[in-house]
């Protein structure tokens, strides 16, 4: 009996392939460590009407601490990246949204989700110390994910 792969499985395989291809084309010597290929769908973001905004994936994680986060949506069969955390940089389609200090970086941990936002904390080295909450939220007017500041 044949079964169709789920969309999540297809996206997982595409990301695994892209990270592997990126590694293979960017590696400069045999001492370079292969990046982690563990990718996990952790949440589906929706607007107030229940329409899907994007899928939230974490990559390079261990014990709920991760170093990369990706929010994507599939449109017309193509993956559109809506938001990306690549270790210390928070990036949306308009460019770098925020930078986290590298000198104390150990990863991130999710605190909570809402339908249209993610709250996370930056962790210091050896999991000592955390940042203030970082909230990535859908901005309806701008039609993109960005850092939400409580002073707004």
Image (cartoon, rainbow, N blue to C red):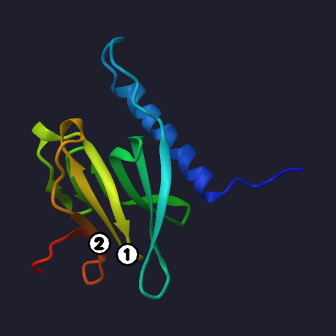
Location of residue 112 in the rendering, given as x and y in whole percent from the top left corner: 36, 66
Q: Residue at x 28, y 51 (%)?
A: 85
Question: Which residue extends farthest front?
Answer: 128
Answer with the quarter of the image where residue 87 lies: top left
Furthest toward the top, the residue is 30
**Residue 89 in picture, x, y percent from top left:** 20, 49
The residue lying toward the viewer, choosing from 65 and 87, is 65
Residue in the foreground of this view, choosing between 66 and 48: 66
- Residue 23, above or below 145: above
Q: In the image, is residue 87 above or below residue 5?
A: above
Is 58 on the left-hand or right-hand side of 17?
left
Mark 2 crowd level (few <14, some 14–19, many ≥20, 10 Å Cα)? many
The image shows residue 25, relative to residue 87, as above or below, that is: above
Q: Secondary structure at mark 1?
A: loop
Quarter that holds the C terminus: bottom left
Q: Residue at x 32, y 52 (%)?
A: 109
Q: Could you tell me which secondary element the residue under label 2 belongs to? A: strand
Crowd class of label 1 (few under 14; some 14 to 19; many from 20; radius 10 Å): many
> Quarter-wise, where is residue 105 in the image?
top left
Q: Residue furthest bottom?
A: 49
Alpha carbon of mark 1 to alpha carbon of mark 2: how far?
A: 6 Å
Asked if labels 2 and 1 touch by Cβ distance under 8 angstroms, the answer is yes
Q: Nearer the viewer, residue 139 or 111?
A: 111
The residue that disc 2 covers is 137
Residue 82, labelled with which disc? Answer: none
Label 1, on which residue? 116
Q: Pinpoint residue 23: horizontal percent, then vertical percent.
A: 39, 29
Q: Residue at x 66, y 57 (%)?
A: 6
Locate residue 91, reporting x and y percent: 24, 56
Tell me what residue is drawn at x 51 percent, y 38 percent.
17
In this rendering, position of residue 54 left or right of residue 141? right
Tag 2 or tag 1, which sits nearer the N-term?
1
């Amino acid at each position: 009996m044949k079964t169709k792969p789920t969309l999540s499985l297809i996206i997982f395989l595409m990301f695994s392939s892209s990270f592997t291809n990126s590694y293979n084309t960017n590696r400069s010597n045999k001492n370079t460590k292969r990046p982690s290929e563990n990718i996990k769908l952790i949440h589906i973001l929706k607007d107030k009407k229940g329409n899907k905004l994007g899928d939230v994936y974490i990559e390079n994680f261990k014990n709920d601490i991760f170093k990369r986060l990706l929010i994507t949506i599939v449109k017309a069969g193509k993956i559109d990246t809506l938001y990306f955390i690549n270790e210390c940089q928070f990036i949306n389609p308009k460019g770098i949204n925020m930078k986290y200090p590298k000198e104390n970086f150990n990863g991130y941990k999710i605190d909570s989700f809402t339908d249209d936002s993610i709250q996370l904390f930056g962790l210091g080295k050896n999991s000592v110390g955390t940042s203030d909450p970082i909230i990535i939220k859908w901005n309806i007017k701008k039609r993109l994910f960005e850092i939400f500041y409580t002073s707004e």
